[in-house]
């Protein structure tokens, strides 16, 4: 069976807790993340078999109403995505850097997954909406042509929902900027 993650992002903390319970009761999924985001948003992330995750996200979507910011089901998630959410994937050599900034966590995670599947890049990190006004950004690194391709794919993904804020590719980052990006 294929593994997936499901994400539901809401404008209400209380509604988020309610829908987290709904998701867990509606399907056999594992709660991966249940937390507040800036500014006053709530993020739920579940994992499990694709069908179960689809069922859980559909149950939340059906009850979220106008409090839904974004949601998604991401089947066959790339192995580098979850580590990038919880920390950093280490990059040893200074290379080109790409950054894609989005209005929602769900859009950013989907964009990051598409980028690493489409291009030979390392997903360095996904920074989720803590202290940045509810936005999210992802950072990839690699050869310039691969980074440009990954950023283009990620931007297209976020843009499909109208959730792209900005994107950039830095071909040869300054050593001080490189260290700051890599250290978080």
Image: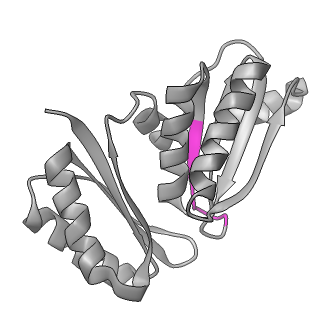
Closer to us: 169 or 34:
169
Region rendered in magenta: 125-132
Q: Find residue 166 and report its horizontal and vertical position in percent.
A: 76, 54
Which residue is depicted at the point 8% across and 53% down? 28
Residue lying farthest top? 93
Which residue is depicted at the point 69% across and 37% down? 151
Res. 110 visible in picture: yes
Which residue is depicted at the point 66% across and 47% down? 155
Q: Find residue 73 and report its horizontal and vertical position in percent.
A: 33, 52
Total numbered badges shown on the rendered structure: 0
Q: Is residue 181 left or right of residue 14?
A: right
Residue lying farthest bottom? 66
Q: Find residue 56 and report its horizontal and vertical position in percent.
A: 19, 62
Which residue is depicted at the point 24% across and 75% down? 19
Residue 123: quarter of image? top right
- Residue 151 lies, with reference to residue 158, above or below; the image says above
Q: Is residue 180 left or right of residue 16?
A: right
Give the quadrant of the C terminus.
top right
Closer to us: 61 or 48:
61
Give the quadrant of the N terminus.
top left
Residue 33: quarter of image? bottom left
- Residue 88 lies, with reference to residue 60, above or below; the image says above
Q: Residue 126 in magenta?
A: yes
Q: Residue 167 in magenta?
A: no
Res. 34 visible in picture: no
Residue 83: quarter of image? top left
- Residue 127 lies, with reference to residue 22, above or below; the image says above
Q: Find residue 89 and report its horizontal and vertical position in percent.
A: 54, 27
């Amino acid at each position: 069976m294929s593994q997936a993650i499901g994400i539901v992002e809401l404008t209400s903390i209380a509604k988020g807790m309610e829908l987290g319970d709904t998701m867990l009761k509606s399907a056999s999924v594992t709660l991966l993340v249940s937390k507040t985001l800036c500014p006053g948003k709530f993020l739920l992330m579940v994992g499990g078999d694709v069908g179960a995750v689809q069922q859980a996200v559909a149950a939340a979507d059906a009850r979220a109403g106008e409090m839904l910011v974004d949601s998604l089901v991401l089947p066959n998630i790339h192995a580098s995505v979850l580590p990038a959410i919880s920390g950093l994937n280490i990059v040893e050599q200074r290379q080109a850097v790409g950054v894609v900034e989005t209005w929602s966590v769900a859009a950013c995670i989907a964009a990051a997954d598409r980028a690493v599947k489409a291009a030979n890049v390392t997903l360095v990190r996904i920074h989720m909406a803590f202290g940045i006004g509810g936005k999210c950004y992802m950072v990839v690194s690699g050869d310039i042509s691969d980074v440009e391709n990954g950023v283009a794919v990620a931007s297209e993904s976020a843009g499909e929902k109208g959730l792209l804020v900005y994107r950039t590719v830095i071909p040869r980052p300054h050593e001080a900027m490189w260290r700051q990006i890599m250290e978080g």
